[in-house]
Amino acid sequence: MATTLTSKSQLTLPKPIREYLKVGPGDRVEFCIGADGAVRVEPVAAPAKPSRRTLAKYRKLRGSGGHAGGSTDELMRLLRGCEDDANDPGFAAVPRP
């Protein structure tokens, strides 16, 4: 089965190939060149979607990044959990309460 490159060097995968690979609009494919010079087309697995439980965990944190009067260094120390780490570059720059 043959297809033609467009003027922009694009091509359309023929329908039987798309069906075999189980890919459609928006899906990604990868072209691989084998040691024998053969070119393979493989579907690229879509990244796993986060679970509802994971999303709920992060929803709880929504809006918590703008603590009043805090500096960026204080926020980074909070996020990294480095309050007592003298090797943390932000440790010395921020006065301790």
Image (cartoon, rainbow, N blue to C red):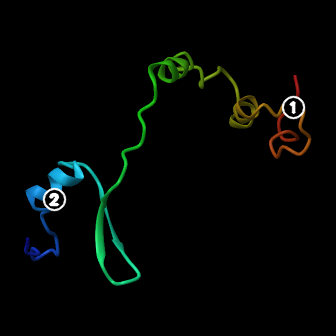
Q: Is residue 91 left or right of residue 53?
A: right
Relative height, residue 90 to residue 97 (above, below) = below
Q: Is residue 6 left or right of residue 58?
A: left
Quarter of the rendering containing residue 4: bottom left
Q: Which mark is residue 95?
A: 1
Q: Is residue 86 left or right of residue 26?
A: right
The first of marks 1 and 2 along the sequence is: 2
Q: Which mark is residue 82?
A: none
Disc nearest the viewer among 1 and 2: 2
Q: Position of residue 81 (x, y in %)?
A: 78, 31
Relative height, residue 33 to residue 57 (above, below) = below
Q: Residue at x 64, y 21 (%)?
A: 67
In what quadrant of the picture does the N terminus appear? bottom left
Q: Is residue 74 left or right of residue 19?
A: right
Relative height, residue 74 to residue 18 (above, below) = above
Residue for badge 2: 17
Q: Position of residue 82 (x, y in %)?
A: 82, 34
**Amino acid type for the residue under numbered disc 1:** Pro
Q: CA distance from mark 1 to mark 2?
A: 63 Å
Q: Residue at x 41, y 43 (%)?
A: 47
Pick the front one: 45 or 77: 45
Quarter of the rendering containing residue 61: top right
